[in-house]
Amino acid sequence: MTDTCFLGANTPEGFRSEYGTLQRDPRIQQLFIVKGGSGCGKSTLMKTLAARAEEYGMAAERILCSSDPASLDGLVIPDVGLAFVDGTAPHVVEPALCGCGANYINLGKYYREAELRPLIPAIRAAKAANAACYAPAYGCLRAAAALSRARRELLGRERIRAVTAEALTQLQEGRLPERGHPGHERRVYLSGVTPDGLLSLPLGEGRVWAIQDGHGVGGVLIRTLADRWREAGEDVILGMDPLDPDSPAAVLLPARGQGWVRVHPAFPGPRQAMLRLDLDAALEDGLSDAVAAGMREMTAMERRLLGEAVGWLRQAKAHHDLMEELYRPAVDFAGVTRETELLCRELFVEN
């Protein structure tokens, strides 16, 4: 149901990564870990491989960079069991057993180091400025998360429990078929706090429930639904919540073309949602005027903090772009292109 996702997220706890799960994905027989610094062509290599795979009629699942959604940090070509991942910080990936289903592609060898040496002070300054922007960005996200927790305290546990229990009865679909073995769970992020704003990635065709959940109480619903379907033998994609990264925000059943997605009002909801459930309205029904007013003010403050976080991430990206501009003239891109074309022949033509 989705051919794009994030495997890392900017969260109130800092950067959270699911990149390590690629080596446990049963669809993947060979993982290529792409190494190299800024501007050396890692994303371009993966974009070229994705386009070439599609030319040969294969599906290409693109993993976007949460610090620059126009850039690729990974690629999965499930038809041939291949995956590629940018294995550099902050999402460092190393082979569990090098040469045994996972190995390196080193694009750092294409730097002309003699040309870079005079630029070291400027590169170091840009890198430090980039890193400095993340502390206030994550501080804003922590403050927004604290406000969300405070709103849940005002609602009260009993109210939340009653509303979510009622919602679960509406979302469950009776007795499920049994396959005799549990399905596989794959964790991704289907939304993100990015320099381009608060993004929700498009889902494919299917039957989708959109659950309005501005107070962040619906994680238990998604977790229950995911466990129920997985135990019945269905493979599930679990979309984690970047604002609460231990809580799932979506579950998709790709083989069935259906899913359930929690929608935070600050993020755009799925366009193809066919069914809607409003947890917020049920939770807010009957609140006193004073409590309702206080919650509206906290919600507005949370939105402002999320906007501030995006602003800091945008500044971080500007400094990263400067690093890339400094590096690119010293990269042998002809060599990168030759290596990319050799990979294409080995992976798609000769096999």
Image (cartoon, grey):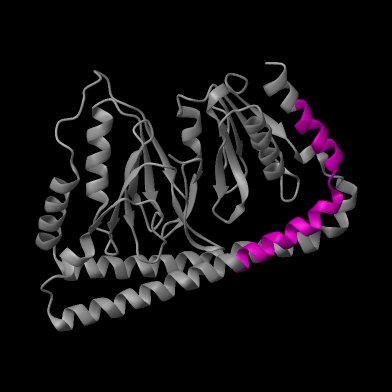
Which residue is outermost to the top? 351
Q: Is residue 260 above or below residue 271?
A: above
Q: Which quadrant of the rendered structure holds the N terminus?
A: top left
What residue span does the magenta drawing correspond to?
315-342
Which residue is outermost to the right? 114
Q: Is residue 141 above or below residue 324?
A: below
- Residue 289: horizontal and vertical position, in percent? 15, 83
Residue sitting at x 37%, y 69%: 144
Residue sitting at x 22%, y 65%: 280
Q: Is residue 226 above or below residue 69?
A: above
Q: Which quadrant of the rendered structure holds the C terminus?
A: top right
Count of numbered labels shown in the rendering:
0
Nearer to us in this view, 120 or 253: 253
Is 316 one of the magenta-colored residues? Answer: yes
Q: Tell me the chief SS of the magenta region.
A: helix
Is 9 one of the magenta-colored residues? Answer: no
Nearer to us in this view, 33 or 228: 228
- Residue 232: horizontal and vertical position, in percent? 24, 27
Residue sitting at x 61%, y 39%: 87
- Residue 113: horizontal and vertical position, in percent? 86, 46
Using the rendered view, name the quadrant where residue 141 is placed: bottom left
Is residue 17 rendered to the left or right of residue 87? left
Is residue 105 rendered to the left or right of residue 283? right
Residue sitting at x 55%, y 69%: 312
Is residue 179 rendered to the left or right of residue 123? left
- Residue 50: horizontal and vertical position, in percent? 64, 36
